[in-house]
Amino acid sequence: MTATSFPLSSLPLLLVALFGFIAFMGARAWRAGTLTQSEAALLFGFFAAGALWTWVCAELALSGAARSAEFLFWLPGLWLPYTIILILQPLRLMAFGRQALYKLMDEVPPAAIVALEGLRILGLGTLIKTFQGTFPVHFEVLTGIPDLLFGFSALAVLWLIARGKITWRGLVRWHLAGLFLLVPAGLFIQLGLPGPLQLFSSPPTSLALFEFPMILAPASAVPLFAFINVWSVLWLRRRRPENLLAPYARSTAAATEKKAQA
């Protein structure tokens, strides 16, 4: 999941969209009374930590530190793409955090999450860069193209949702597919970096992913998409919504009211 080269890269705008969507829905759920003040503070706190990590990675790339021998010694491909997931992991592990996440998702139409995942089509930029010879071929073939195809599949899933031809179970399988496409990305990055695991050494190598703004993809955008996949699977299995076009909270309330009037 990547974008075009600096300064025309869409990656900063993509991250604004991802963090902005989460912040907007969180504020909306709080104003609606779905989230308590402490739940909203917890969610915003963890996602603010993710945003801070994004800024740190941008600084590392801009200063050149992310491409230094000292930094590469720690095999960053094996951990950097998963750092935001680790930062947000307590939200899933704590009962209070899980409750806040479920309540936040209750206010978001499942179709909106599908559309958000569809932003992975911006990976078209790395395909173009690969043809231009400025992006590692091995990473594009192993991760970039599958991720791009998943982004386009969101359009088909939205079409199925609009016509009622896919259930929450089908959506679970789709999110799992999107997650598993990203899981090995860190290893594929490391295979193109200097070190004991380097398998692909022909330029351009994975060092291209440690330049600004490209570093924003593995350090922030990709793990955020993966976390949203995980988050969606857990929510769908718990709520089992029938209406994928409307927020669960509203559709459930409407169904309850209709039963009461019957």
Image (cartoon, rainbow, N blue to C red):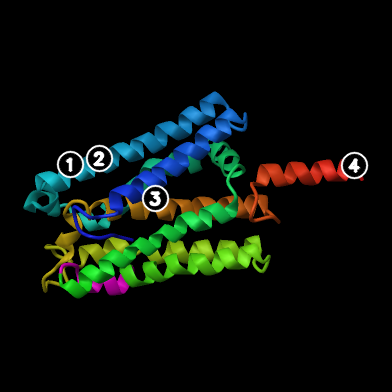
Task: Please name the residue that numbered disc 4 is placed on.
Answer: 261
Q: Earlier in the sequence, mark 3 or mark 4?
A: 3
Classify mark 2: helix, strand or loop. helix
Q: Residue 262 appears at what percent x and percent y?
A: 92, 45
Classify 10 Å Cα crowding around label 2: few (below 14), some (14-19), many (20 and above). Answer: some
Magenta residue check for 70? no
Q: Which residue is found at the position 37% from the left and 34% from the top?
A: 48
Kindly indicate the quadrant of the structure image that contains residue 148. Answer: bottom left
Asked if labels 4 and 3 touch by Cβ distance under 8 angstroms, the answer is no
Q: Which residues are magenta?
A: 134-143
From mark 1 to mark 2, how far is it between C-alphas?
A: 6 Å
Distance from disc 3 to disc 1, alpha carbons, whole Å, reads: 19 Å
Between 75 and 51, the one lying in front of the other is 51
Of callouts 1 and 4, the N-terminal one: 1
Q: Label 4 is placed on what type of residue?
A: Gln
In the image shown, does 239 or 19 lie closer to the viewer? Answer: 19
Disc 1 and disc 2 in contact, CB within 8 angstroms: yes
The numbered disc on residue 224 is 3
Disc 4: CA contacts within 10 A as few (<14), some (14-19) or many (>=20): few
Task: Give the number of the mark in front: 2 or 4.
Answer: 4
Image position, residue 209 (x, y; %): 20, 59
What residue appears at the point 26 percent right and 66 percent down from the top-left corner? 126
* Residue located farthest toward the right when viewing the structure as drawn: 262
Mark drawn on residue 59? 1
Residue 53 is drawn in which quadrant?
top left
Q: Which residue is mark 2?
A: 55
Number of marks: 4
